[in-house]
């Protein structure tokens, strides 16, 4: 996977506006400068120029299938309909155990499927989560986590592998790749100083 695709994935994760979205011509440093992107966006593009997303393993694909089965069995919405339960998620811990969850949409900000799956894992003894994926109902495929979920993953699950949709199919990135220059938050100390070691 080339740098243009990687930057596009990360930009979507950072909620960068369409003005700076990747085009078929690429989203490298030169393209950023040509479009008048801010200095921080240019730095992100430069930093990601050597990053590679990995191809999912057989275990990763098993996790995708589990998330798909979970939401297909539990969705409350038909195709192209809104519902409270339209996304499923699955996580795998370091021991290989898998845990699932579905979202609970509500206008007040109900939890995403990823957070439910993480809570389920904790309730069932899962402590070291290494991989996570979310899948839409009715064959909509893999979805990347929203901004809130990415921050939760960054804060509580350093190094977690995240499955993402790309133009080349499902790929895997660490949460640090999806959150360049992010500052972690802790219950004890609030927002922390930038820790460069997280990104090495």
Image (cartoon, helix red, strand yellow):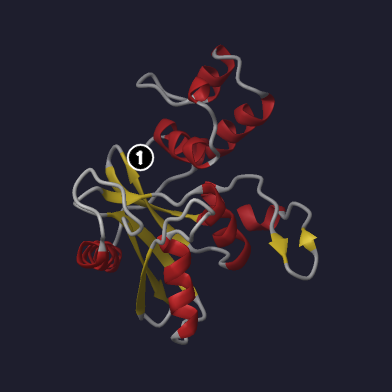
Q: Position of residue 178 (x, y in %)?
A: 52, 48
Q: Image check: 67 left or right of 2?
A: left
Camera sees residue 200: no
Residue in the picture at 48% in, 65% down: 115
Circle 1 sits in a helix, a strand or a loop, which is it? loop
Q: Relative to 161, is 140 above or below?
A: above
Q: Residue furthest bottom?
A: 125
The residue under the point 51% across, 77% down is 128
Residue 101: x and y in percent read 37, 69
Left or right of 193 in this view: 145: left
Task: In the rendered view, tell whether residue 69 sits above or below residue 22.
Answer: below
Quadrant hosting residue 59: bottom left
Q: Quadrant of the C terminus?
A: bottom right
Residue at (43, 45) in percent of width and height: 52
- Does 72 sit left or right of 124 as displayed? left
Where is residue 162? Give x, y as percent: 43, 57
Q: Nearer the viewer, residue 118 or 132?
A: 118
The residue carrying mark 1 is: 1
Q: Quadrant of the N terminus?
A: top left
| Dot 1 crowding, Cα within 10 Å, few <14, some 14–19, many 20+ | some
Percent from the top left, x then y, of residue 127? 51, 81
Kindly tell me whether residue 195 is visible in this rendering: yes
Could you tell me which residue is drawn at 44 percent across and 39 percent down? Answer: 9
């Amino acid at each position: 996977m080339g740098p243009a695709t990687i930057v596009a994935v990360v930009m979507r994760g950072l909620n960068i506006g369409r003005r700076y979205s990747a085009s078929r011509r690429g989203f490298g440093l030169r393209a950023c400068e040509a479009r008048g992107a801010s200095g921080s966006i240019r730095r992100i593009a430069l930093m990601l120029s050597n990053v590679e997303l990995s191809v999912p393993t057989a275990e990763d694909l098993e996790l995708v299938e589990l998330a798909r089965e979970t939401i297909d069995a539990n969705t409350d919405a038909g195709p192209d309909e809104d519902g409270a339960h339209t996304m499923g998620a699955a996580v795998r811990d370091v021991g290989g155990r898998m845990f699932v969850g579905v979202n609970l949409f509500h206008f007040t900000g109900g939890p995403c499927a990823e957070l439910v799956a993480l809570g389920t894992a904790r309730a069932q003894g899962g402590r070291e989560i290494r991989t996570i994926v979310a899948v839409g109902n009715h064959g909509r495929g893999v979805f990347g986590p929203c901004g809130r979920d990415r921050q939760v993953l960054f804060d509580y699950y350093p190094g977690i592998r995240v499955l993402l949709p790309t133009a080349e199919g499902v790929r895997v990135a660490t949460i640090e790749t999806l959150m360049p220059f992010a500052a972690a938050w802790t219950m004890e100390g609030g927002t922390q100083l930038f820790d460069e070691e997280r990104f090495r």
